[in-house]
Amino acid sequence: MLYFANWKVTLICAVCALGVLLSLPNLFSPAFLAKLPEAVPHKQVSLGLDLRGGSYLLLEVDVAAAQRDRLNAIIDNVRNALRNANIGYTGLEVQGTAITFKLRDMGTIDNAREALRKIDPDLTVTIAADGTGTVAFSAVATEARRRQAVDQSIEIIRRRIDETGIKEPQIQREGQDRILVQLPGVDDPEHVKSLLGRTAKLTFQLVDTGTSVEEARAGHLPAGDEILPAAERNGSRVGPDAYVVRRRVMVGGDTLVDAQPTFQNNEPVVSFRFDAVGARRFGDATRENVGKPFAIVLDNKVISAPIIREAILGGSGIISGSFTVQSASDLALLLRAGALPAPITILEERTVGPDLGADSIHAGALASIVGVALVVVFMVLFYGLFGIFADIALFFNLCLMLGALSLLGATLTLPGIAGIALTMGMAVDANVLIYERIREELRGGRTMLSSLEAGFKRAFGTILDSHVTTLVAGALMFWLGSGPVKGFAVTLSIGVLTSLFSAILVTRLLIVTWVRQWKPKAIPI
Amino acid sequence: MLRPLIVIRRTPTIDFMAWHKIGFAFSAFLTTASVVLFLTLGLNYGIDFVGGTLIEVRSTTGPANLADMRQKLDALHIGEASLQGFGPPTDVLIRLPRQPGGDAAQEKAVALARKALGAGVEYRRVEVVGPSVGSELIRAGVIATVLALFAIAVYIWFRFEWQFGVGGMISTLHDVLTTVGLFALLRLEFDLTTLAAILTVAGYSVNDTVVIYDRVREAMRKYRTMSLSDLINLALNETLSRTILTVSTVALAVLSLLFLGGPVLRGFSIAMLWGVVIGTYSSLFIAAPVLYYVRPNRAVIARSGEPAAGAPSRAR
């Protein structure tokens, strides 16, 4: 017991010193830390949004919608493939996650299969003996598509948020098709939400002047056309409420390289510029259709349908459509950032204002300090000198906890602060177990030294067992975890681990040193 | 030399086993009442679990006028809004019920509410949870709690004998159920942090149990002929001062969280406080006496122990 190998002493002291060193930056302001030399630890515990204020948004990418879009795009290819091979069919449509149809002539099954396979290697074609067939994406392709859609969405969302000038946004994938967006310092996320909620798919399509909306609605929609509603314009609407447009897209928004809000005749408009491919396509399309109107379509709504006066060859243009300054700059931003591959829904929003955050820090800190102070006094009352030893160990435990949290870059939430206060109360449990054991051994008639020895040795197994169960709960909470609770699970688990070190090793070292230096005749316990 | 001011000098000699039937009856009542309350009254689920909207506002023009706010919100026809004071008289907590029509509908309701409340209020907190997330969280919460109970039982089984695992699980289940019952009875909001508190309670309450079981096992090796009932009593008395002291330190920490930690942590602190107290009670009056009925195999335990762990030897 009295013997503590030198290397052990050094190691324990080193760990404690490291804990103090790593936790120290938390006492200073970031501005002060920036002035310190590189070698000094800088990392602070980062505060969760519930403490520093900000917005937390959980988004879901509607992968199914993206898949439906893709099937809708491919249905034309299926139609053409069957037609070109002179195969008769009926009932061609998208049903759920597949395109279904029925062949007229059972003799054409093999030909149909052959023709359809050529469309896309990712497609699985099945045609039953009765001529009913389905075309669907293979499971692998669907999965790849899903991953791609989410990755792409994250990228687009990042660009959109960066464009708004919000500092330090955190955007990460959550589960299979969810995206977690954390925006520190944003206390009214309405604008961000409106930006994220829009797909921003821009297309230029020709207006079919050969028919009218009324006729089309009455069931005479020409093949290859669609009816699109006009976009809302500041409440008042100028012109028709819908347009009949060609399905074929002249040019898509994916070929845009820039978009800026600007003014034309004192009205806010958005100017845009195509890349080389887009410019050529736009030039060709406008040259062939001079005098006809074309629709500027955003998310399946017609913003405006100007008449092409002459071929637009310069690769740039202007979208007008009764914008406000804000809506023009939003549209420009969305066009610059690109379209989302699939619609996004907001599943969860948690916004904390800076005042509440500050109040929470204040309350949490006060509660922790008072709680720890009470525990410290309690230990001295019940264990005297040994209580002070336990308190010293407790101090190092706190440092190690903060140090570990800083080093791991963990996020401190309000429940996390509660976790710290709680583990401080629990940490002395190990001391109590050891001290009570020492008392018992003394009562049993052992000498002072052998009681100390036995106390530490016997209590160890018990301490370990009783801590593991708390760790199990912590691990489950982390797994279950959503933001604040995860923060609690992290501090609780780290606190339990560091308390094992401090309560057992640090206390023991303190007691050994005391026995050696002061050579007491009895234990004050 | 600094001596402790308060010392428990002697090992107490309380006959816990004489009380265990009363303890069982009391706990059976508590647990049954909790289950009945849970099934009839149900829990007052927070928006984390059922979805909906929670808005905390602070009036910037003196004390908040709840009646006026209620009127403004009722005019929106977004279901019955509940308003309550929250801390200082300027602060109001507004709850909007879950809106029909999926996740997007919730967002729309908040935008309407913000518009209706207008200037004169400052938004301290806005939480919107769609129905899909809520139901997932309920499922995850139930799974986590059940897993925690099993993991704890398996760990105790692994470290002791299966009989001890049964005792540990029964007492932990008792603690979890009565905490849920307390929340059902007092209509306290049951949210994610409450669930975190319950899981912590599960992990922590078994602490005392493990310490006591440890002592029971040790006594089984030491006193091979002592009756099981006396053994349990001995173990409980020998660990009693430790049990009380540790519960006190944790209770001190929890009490300061309850009184100083602010309204956001209140539910969490209440669950923790109850859990710590009931966990200690159940370790003494449920977990230990259960051993008397499940009858651990003393021969196996005696054999497994290292012989050196015998009676505290007289001074060498």
Image (spheres, coloured by chain):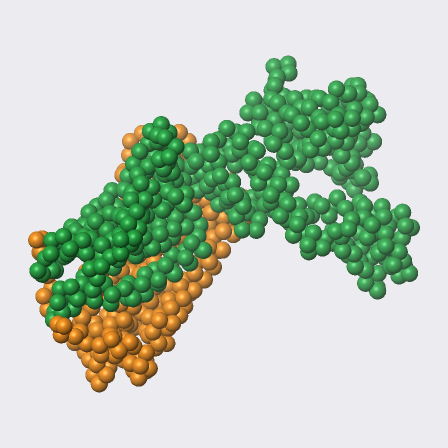
The image quadrant of residue A129 is bottom right
From the viewer's perspective, is residue A193 above or below residue A288?
Answer: below
Chain A colour is green
The quadrant the C terminus of chain B occupies is: bottom left
From the viewer's perspective, is residue A226 above or below residue B191?
Answer: above
Report the side of B149 relative to A447 (left or right): right
Q: Position of residue A145 (x, y in %)?
A: 66, 48
For the question of whether residue B262 can be seen, the reply is no
Chain B colour is orange
The image quadrant of residue A357 is top left
Report the side of B271 relative to A228 (left or right): left
The residue lying furthest to the front in this view is: A6
Q: Nearer the viewer, residue B223 or B258?
A: B223
Q: Nearer the viewer, residue A346 or A415?
A: A415
Q: Nearer the viewer, residue A205 or B150?
A: B150
Q: Position of residue A206 (x, y in %)?
A: 77, 30
Q: Position of residue A81 (x, y in %)?
A: 85, 48
Residue drawn at (41%, 31%) of the image: B118
Residue drawn at (29%, 81%) of the image: B302
The residue lying furthest to the bottom in this view is: B225
Residue drawn at (16%, 51%) of the image: A388
For the question of whether residue A217 can be seen, the reply is yes
Report the side of B25 relative to A260 (left or right): left
Q: Position of residue A424 (x, y in %)?
A: 26, 51
From the viewer's perspective, is residue B116 above or below residue B292?
Answer: above
The image quadrant of residue A153 is top right
Residue drawn at (47%, 59%) of the image: B139
- Count how many numbered circles sit on residues in the image: 0
Q: Nearer the viewer, residue A514 or A274?
A: A514
